[in-house]
Image (cartoon, rainbow, N blue to C red):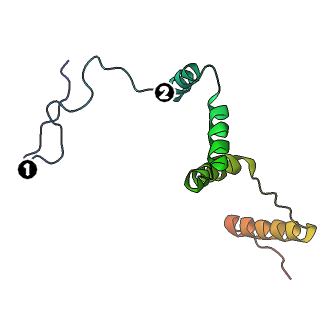
Amino acid sequence: MEKNKQKAKPNGGRGGARKGAGRPKGARENISIKQLLETLESKAGGRDYEDLLVEDFLEARQNKDVQTTLKYHNLILNKVMSSLAKIEVTDSKDAIEAKQAAFAEALARLVGVETDTK
């Protein structure tokens, strides 16, 4: 069974497949996050990546490195806080009854049933 191979487009060499492009045969697969963290942990003497991040953050603060400290704050706010933050919405009894009435009315209109709304 033949493999489908694209041919280069005749529009000045833009787009399409190119000879020699892509990963060479026999090349290793992409590095996974798990592999990266395991390698980092082994090179760091068995210390977790999170511990290294905290240590680097504290070192940046101690050295008054404002730019690096701000980068750590952004990392924490964007990644960590979003998973911790939650919003709790509570409705009053009146709001729930109003929503139920509106839903019942919309459903009645959908199925063609007339309602007594006086």
Seen in the picture, residue 84 relative to 92 is either above or below; the reply is above
Seen in the picture, residue 38 relative to 6 is either above or below; the reply is above
For disc 1, the neighbor class at 10 Å (few under 14, some 14 to 19, many from 20) is few
Residue visible at 82% across and 57% down in the picture: 88
Residue 19 vs residue 36: left or right?
left
Q: Position of residue 102 (x, y in %)?
A: 78, 70
Q: Amino acid at mark 2?
A: Ser
Instruction: Name the residue carrying label 2.
Output: 32
Q: Position of residue 60 (x, y in %)?
A: 62, 47
Residue 34 vs residue 11, the one in the foreground: 34
Q: How many marks?
A: 2
Q: Position of residue 111 (x, y in %)?
A: 69, 64
Residue 103 vs residue 22, the one in the foreground: 22
Q: Tag 2's secondary structure?
A: loop
Residue visible at 88% across and 68% down in the picture: 97
Residue 36 vs residue 25: left or right?
right
In the image, farthest residue toward the bottom: 118
> Which dot marks residue 12?
1
Q: Tag 1's secondary structure?
A: loop
Q: CA distance from mark 2 to mark 1?
A: 37 Å
Residue 28 vs residue 46, the one in the foreground: 46
